[in-house]
Amino acid sequence: MNLFNLIGDFSTFFFRSLFIPWKIRTSKSRILEQVYSIGIGSLPIIIIIAAFTGLVSTVQSTYQMVGTVPRYLIGTTVGRMVLIELGPILTALMVSGRCASSMAAEIGTMRVTEQIDALEIMAIDPYRFLGLPRIVGTFISLPVLTIFSEFVALACGAVYAHYFLNIPFSVFSYGIIHFFAMRDFLGGLVKSLFFSLVIGASGCYFGFIVKGGAKEVGRAATYAVVTASILILVLDFLVAVVIFG
Amino acid sequence: MIEVKDLSKKFDDLIVLDNVSFTVGEARLVVILGPSGTGKTVLLKTILGILPVDSGVVLFNGKSIQAAKENEIYDIRKHVGFVFQSTALFDSMNVCENIALPLVEHTKLSSRQVRDKVQEILEIVGMAGKERLYPGSLSGGMKRLVAVGRALALDPKYLFYDEPTTGLDPVMRDRIVQLIIALKKDYKKSGIVVTHDLDTAEKVGDDIYLLKKGKISKLEQIKKEVYNG
Ligand SMILES: Nc1ncnc2c1ncn2[C@@H]1O[C@H](COP(=O)(O)OP(=O)(O)OP(=O)(O)O)[C@@H](O)[C@H]1O
Ligand SMILES: [Mg+2]
């Protein structure tokens, strides 16, 4: 596949799915359904990932810094790492693995079993019916999941620091709160908004372009996750340059 | 009235439709007869603009679907019910939701009215009582009946049937043939029936055409030799 064609098609698809009349009356329930399956459905895995992210970054920061700086700075470091980078990116990668693949598989199956043709023949725009709710659903769910995972990560880090590293809650949280910069938090959130668009759009795009059968559906799921993950990292870099550079 | 004029379509080197022309008159059923793989499904899909044509036009009451803008195409399609060869029922929705979908999307009916309309349709196609089942748990024949029901939802003027009786036992085949005839007689639905089954063609068709090697020709009466040779 030619890269430039891909980028062109992909952006066309994206605008085609969002810049149409939303018909909120009928789209609302489908958007909520997606928010539920992406948001609530991802919670367990996000909690696990976030908990271990918090633990590992606390252990590593302590290992590198203890004895050289005041102990509350460990709270600061963990806080910033989680808010700026680890929270948004790991949540996005997890949701991409879980949801972009299932979107591509679901829409791809509908493509090969002519269900998308059926929508078109019933004069139902398949982009509005299938694309829009998934992209908007991810856009709503991912930032919320990100904030949630940041909270879980910091809480786990604090608990570990308190009981195992001899850094009391008060000290750890002083480090987080005293040096809390709104820009860190919002920057991470802005990133997660971009990531959500990438996840929703590539999940749906690779589903829509499936031709063939079961094998191609499987491949679409793979492409969706790989593309979303690469784009997430590229966007992460670009946003970092703009906001923090 | 649907007028198909000089429709041509090829995939790479494979010529599937070669200057195909015919007309679907008011309250008439046109049967397109042809062996497997001649392009019957492709013909139906090009008529509705799901597949692009290479040349030719299709006029719905004088309005060309090829020249129409996207929302105009959608308006035309609301007047056509399509029964897919594969049925293409939405497998994540039950029978009731499948039939209700076009109503929910295109009309302002209350959920009560939608339910009543779905009931009415299920009665017509003889699937009452099956509304909670999912397509995965229906037999091939029942899926066809539900697909006809879904095609009827918006009360279209035309119905297109793609191989409605293929692969069914004689009882179910007869049931579907009777349904197609009833829909024409009692509900004034005209349309196109695509099939490779001579028997079905004879029973339901007002005008019968043979599609073979991309060419279409009108049959005055079905001659088995023409079809086979
Ligand atoms: N999207 C496509 N791309 C390339 N070739 C296609 C495509 N769709 C159909 N064809 C080819 O066009 C020809 C006609 O296909 P079509 O599905 O219309 O046959 P049919 O008459 O409906 O047959 P059947 O009775 O088996 O359903 C076949 O040779 C098929 O391989
Ligand atoms: Mg066919």
Image (cartoon, coloured by chain):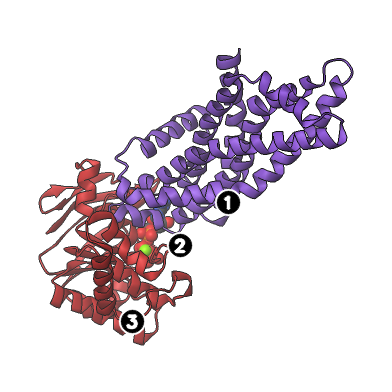
Chain colours: A purple, B red
- Residue A117 percent location from the top left of the image: 36, 54
Mark drawn on residue B173? 3
Tell me how far mark 3 sits from mark 1, CA to CA.
Answer: 44 Å
Task: Identify the residue position indicated by label 2 in the image.
Answer: B92
Q: Determine the residue positioned at 25% across, 63% down.
A: B81
Q: Which residue is mark 1?
A: A41
Badge nearest the viewer, 3 or 1: 1
Q: Callout 1: few (<14), some (14-19), or many (20+) C-alpha neighbours within 10 Å?
A: some
Q: Secondary structure at mark 2?
A: loop
Mark 3 crowdedness (10 Å alpha carbons): few <14, some 14-19, many ≥20: some
Please give left or right for residue B121 compared with residue A83 in the image.
left
Q: State the residue at coordinates (30%, 45%).
A: A23
Q: What is the chain letter for disc 2?
A: B
Specify the amino acid type for callout 1.
Gly
Q: Secondary structure at mark 3?
A: helix
* Kind of residue at badge 2: Ser
Residue that sits furthest to the top in the current view? A245
Q: Name the residue at 32% across, 45% down.
A: A24
Q: Position of residue B226 (x, y in %)?
A: 27, 72
Q: Specify whether disc 3 shares its chain with disc 2.
A: yes
At mark 1, the secondary structure is helix
Task: Judge from the rendering whether residue A114 lies leftward or rightward of residue A6; answer left or right.
Answer: left
Q: Which callout, 2 or 1, points to the residue nearer the camera? A: 1
Question: Is residue B223 visible from the viewing direction of this image?
Answer: no
**Mark-to-mark CA distance, 3 and 2:** 27 Å
Q: Quadrant of the C terminus of chain A?
A: top right
Q: Locate residue A155, reporting x and y percent.
A: 71, 36
Is the Cβ of the residue at disc 2 closer than 8 Å to that at disc 1?
A: no
Q: Which mark is residue B142?
A: none
